[in-house]
Structures are given as structure tokens and as C-alpha cells.
Amino acid sequence: MLMAASQLHSKAMRPRRFVIMGVSGCGKSSVGAALAYHLSGIYIDGDDLHPAANVAKMSAGVPLTDADRWPWLNSVGECLAQAEEPVLIGCSALKQIYRDTIRAAVDGPVRFIHLAGKREVIAARLQLRQGHFMPAALLESQFAALEPPGPGEQAVTVDIDQPFDTVIAAIIAALEEEEL
């Protein structure tokens, strides 16, 4: 049974910091917004925290380098650290070192929620997406960089190849289980 948003919010969740992670097209924005509603928090699209030069590179179909990512990852961490209420940020956080960088900037607990999916599923989603700067051609570079969270990272991983409501319910159930 799912807890009401107020019950989830009242269980030692002030402030709580979450990163909705995964490759482009996995649903970070949609899932993040829905979870923010359930957790009585706010959702921030990590794409909005990218420096203009990063957006220009990705728009041109050029994958980002680690040097490009460090300022962005630090911005994600700083945004999480300043949170006074539950906050969720959509950020690819593809490598463990990226997640470690975010954790270091926060200097506190951060829960990563990995939206995992098969290439074919995500590629099909990207083909339907319009108006986003990240071209589908960069999907392969994202999968090549992806280091799924390991057991020591205490991340929640959910398969996105299921109905949206089921994805949300699975994440909420995993978070509830941790709170018990």
C-alpha cells in the first residue's frame, strides 16, 4: 500500500535530495515531476543547469567530455545542497565519479534513482521527442559511458519498460521500504 504524500513527507524527509538519473530519453523529467508531487517537493531539470557551451556542443551532436561536465555536476550538487524542502534533479549522472562529485558538492546524503531501460526502448522514445537539444545520435555515447549504480551507492533502479504509473509506484515503494 502506498503512503499518502503527507505521510512520506513527514517521515524524516526534510530535506531530502534525489537525483533522477539515466541516459537521455529515459524519462527523468516526467518521473522527476511526478515524484516531486508525491514527495511534496520540487523538481529541477538538470538540463537547465548546463552552461550554454555544453548545450551548444550537445545540440551540434558532440558528446560532452568530463571537463565539460564538472562545472555542471557541481551546479547540480550546489542546487541540491541549498534545498530547504525535498528536491529532485534530473541529471544523467552516468558514471560513479559523476555521482561522487554531486555527493561531495552536497556534503550530505543524496539518493539516486536510476531509470534503466534497453537501448531499443529508449531509442524509440527519443525518436518521438521533439524540441530537445540532445539528439538521438548521442544515445550510443551515453550507453557507452553508463556505469549503473553499484550496491554500495544505495540507489534505486527501476526498469522503465512498463507503464508510467508502475514506474512511479515502484520507486515510491522502494523509498517507503527504506523509511521503515
Image (cartoon, grey):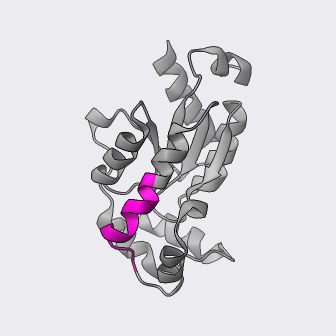
Q: Does residue 126 appear left or right of residue 159 in this picture?
A: right
Which quadrant, please, contains the N terminus?
top right
Location of residue 66 (image quadrant): bottom left
- Whether the magenta-drawn stretch holds residue 9 is answered as no
* Residue at the (59%, 36%) spot, across then down: 83
Q: Does residue 158 appear left or right of residue 10 in this picture?
A: left
> Is any atom of residue 163 visible in this view?
no
Q: Which residues are magenta?
A: 63-74
Q: Nearer the viewer, residue 153 or 15?
A: 15
Residue 69: x and y in percent read 39, 65
Residue 38: x and y in percent read 70, 32
Residue 116: x and y in percent read 44, 52
- Kindly report the secondary structure that dominates the magenta region of the rendered protein: helix
Location of residue 85 (image quadrant): top right
**Most distant residue in the bottom direction:** 60
* Residue at the (55%, 65%) spot, across then down: 25
- Whether the magenta-drawn stretch holds residue 66 is answered as yes
* Residue at the (53%, 66%) spot, across then down: 50
